[in-house]
Image (tube, rainbow, N blue to C red):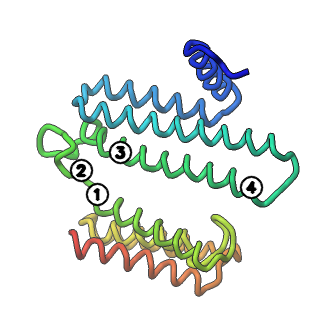
């Protein structure tokens, strides 16, 4: 029955959270990660703004995971047989958790990197730009473009086939970033060789066609070059 008092509603909400934590392994991982982030925030004595952003990121990830769990149980209530729409509902809800988690990880890096690593010239804060902004930004742009293209061409399956090769795009984006980041020619060539081996592995495993691999490599390299040229 629907609770009639606010204390009963509160108890229902708490019971829902406890049940989800008991039954969902990923939710337990998110709570442990949030605990670790809060410990680091207190240990490094971050500013009030930084602390607020870290707490907000942790709350959003846990919120997304709770919504994902709720949608999964609702779908299971409606049908216990395989249905394409039921699969899509669960996959999209899981995708929301993934997007939120990636955003929270980026925010955590921006806030905590200056405290953990010597990336700043002076006292770290969110106003200054941390190292790695261009490579990380270029890599995220490459991933977004790959997702849009894979959705457009609708070939293959996630992490297995499709136009273009996401592995090749990411590998060559990282290689170009290393080449342009004053890491030395030898290191850059070694990373470029590694990117070529990653791309070759997609061909040897017959996951991608040569055209998909080449387009992925060109996409990753060109987007990264464009980002460094425009903002470097």
Give the mark, 2 or 4, whose residue is nearer the N terminus.
4
Label 1 to label 3: alpha-carbon separation = 12 Å
Classify mark 3: residues with Cα within 10 Å, few (<14), some (14-19) or many (20+): some
| Marking on residue 133 | 1
Query: Is 205 situated left or right of 10 in this image?
Result: right
Please tell me whether residue 68 is drawn above or below residue 216 in the rendered image: above
> Disc 2 on helix, strand or loop?
loop
Q: Which residue shows up at 22% across the image and 42% down it?
A: 118
Q: Which residue shows up at 52% across the image and 28% down it?
A: 32
Tell me the residue that label 4 is attached to.
87
Q: Nearer the viewer, mark 4 or mark 3?
A: 4
Classify mark 1: residues with Cα within 10 Å, few (<14), some (14-19) or many (20+): few
Q: How many marks?
A: 4
Asked if the residue under mark 2 is in contact with the one under mark 3, i.e. CB atoms within 8 Å, the reply is no
> Disc 3 on helix, strand or loop?
helix
Query: Is 176 situated left or right of 123 in this image?
Result: right
Please tell me whether residue 72 is drawn above or below residue 176 in the rendered image: above
Q: Which residue shows up at 61% across the image and 85% down it?
A: 210
Tell me the residue that label 2 is attached to.
130
Query: Is 90 situated left or right of 170 in this image?
Result: right
x, y percent for residue 120: 17, 45
Label 4 to label 3: alpha-carbon separation = 30 Å
Classify mark 4: residues with Cα within 10 Å, few (<14), some (14-19) or many (20+): few
Tell me the residue that label 3 is attached to.
107
Label 3 to label 2: alpha-carbon separation = 12 Å
Label 2 to label 4: alpha-carbon separation = 40 Å
> Splitting the image into 4 quarters, where does residue 83 fall?
bottom right
Asked if the residue under mark 2 is in contact with the one under mark 1, i.e. CB atoms within 8 Å, the reply is yes
């Amino acid at each position: 029955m629907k609770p009639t008092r606010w204390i009963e509603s509160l108890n229902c909400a708490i019971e829902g959270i406890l049940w989800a934590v008991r039954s969902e392994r990923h939710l337990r991982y998110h709570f442990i990660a949030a605990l670790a982030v809060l410990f680091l925030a207190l240990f490094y004595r971050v500013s009030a703004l930084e602390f607020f952003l870290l707490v907000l990121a942790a709350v959003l990830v846990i919120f997304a995971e709770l919504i994902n769990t709720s949608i999964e149980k609702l779908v299971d209530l409606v049908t216990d047989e395989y249905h394409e729409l039921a699969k899509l509902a669960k996959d999209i809800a899981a995708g929301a958790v993934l997007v939120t988690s990636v955003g929270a990880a980026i925010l955590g890096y921006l806030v905590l990197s200056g405290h953990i690593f010597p990336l700043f010239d002076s006292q770290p804060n969110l106003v200054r730009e941390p190292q790695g902004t261009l490579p990380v930004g270029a890599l995220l742009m490459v991933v977004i473009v790959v997702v849009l293209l894979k959705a457009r061409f609708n070939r293959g399956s996630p992490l297995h086939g499709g136009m273009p090769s996401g592995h090749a795009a990411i590998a060559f984006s990282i290689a170009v970033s290393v080449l342009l980041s004053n890491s030395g020619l030898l290191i850059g060539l070694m990373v470029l060789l590694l990117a070529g081996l990653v791309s070759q592995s997609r061909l040897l495993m017959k996951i991608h066609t040569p055209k998909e691999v080449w387009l992925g490599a060109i996409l990753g390299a060109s987007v990264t070059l464009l980002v460094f040229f425009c903002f470097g």
